[in-house]
Image (cartoon, rainbow, N blue to C red):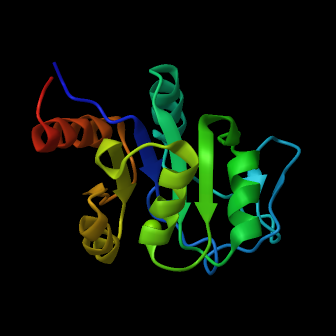
Amino acid sequence: MLKKPKLIAFDLDYTLWPFWVDTHVDPPFRKAKNGQVVDAQSRKVKYYKEVPSVLKQLHNEGYVLAVASRTGEIDGANQLLKLFDWEKYFTYKEIYPGSKTTHFQRIKTKSGIDFSEMLFFDDEHRNKIDLNTIGVLMILVDDGVTQELIRKGLENFSEQYGSK
Ligand SMILES: [Mg+2]
């Protein structure tokens, strides 16, 4: 049996969507008549294509889901989560600049879930170094979150914490 995390957290930029929300796109965002999410220049705003199915599946499987992002574009990030209809999946959203250890301290306080029961997906290696110090297992994201990466992440988690 795989040992599973209780909580799975995600970074936003280059993890759930392929850009920096504070520099590459132009908030505010809105839904165009054709249903596409666009920025202030009416440019289509994309996400990594497997993300909606990944979030839906993990949510349905009973994992507690969270966002941990260091972006300074807090309003824009929240708008996109709403417009992409992903907000319903996330129990915790920690979106503000600073060290990610702060984000996870707050998630721990709010949820009562220990760092050793969390799994985190993020594209920046320096965050992995920070999170190592408090014992949150971070999986480095290379080209956006996919079903395959989630499977590998859950496998790594089970190897790290042992089966039960
Ligand atoms: Mg990122």
Q: Position of residue 37 (x, y in %)?
A: 75, 51
**Residue 26 or residue 117, whichever sits in front:** 117
Judge left or right: residue 31 versus residue 2. Answer: right
Q: Quadrant of residue 20?
A: bottom right
Judge left or right: residue 68 versus residue 37. Answer: left
Marker count (numbered): 0
Which quadrant of the render holds ligand 1? Answer: bottom left
Residue that sits furthest to the right in the current view: 33
Image quarter of the N terminus: top left
Q: Residue at position x 25%, y 43% from top? A: 153
Q: Residue at position x 34%, y 51% from top? A: 115
Picture layout, residue 101 above or below residue 35: below
Q: Residue at position x 46%, y 52% from top? A: 10
Judge left or right: residue 35 versus residue 86. Answer: right
- Residue 16 appears anywhere in the view: no
Picture layout, residue 14 above or below residue 85: below
Image quarter of the C terminus: top left
Q: Position of residue 80 (x, y in %)?
A: 71, 55
Q: Position of residue 148 (x, y in %)?
A: 27, 37
Q: Position of residue 61 (x, y in %)?
A: 44, 21
- Residue 69 appears anywhere in the view: yes
Judge left or right: residue 123 versus residue 82. Answer: left
Q: Quadrant of residue 129?
A: bottom left
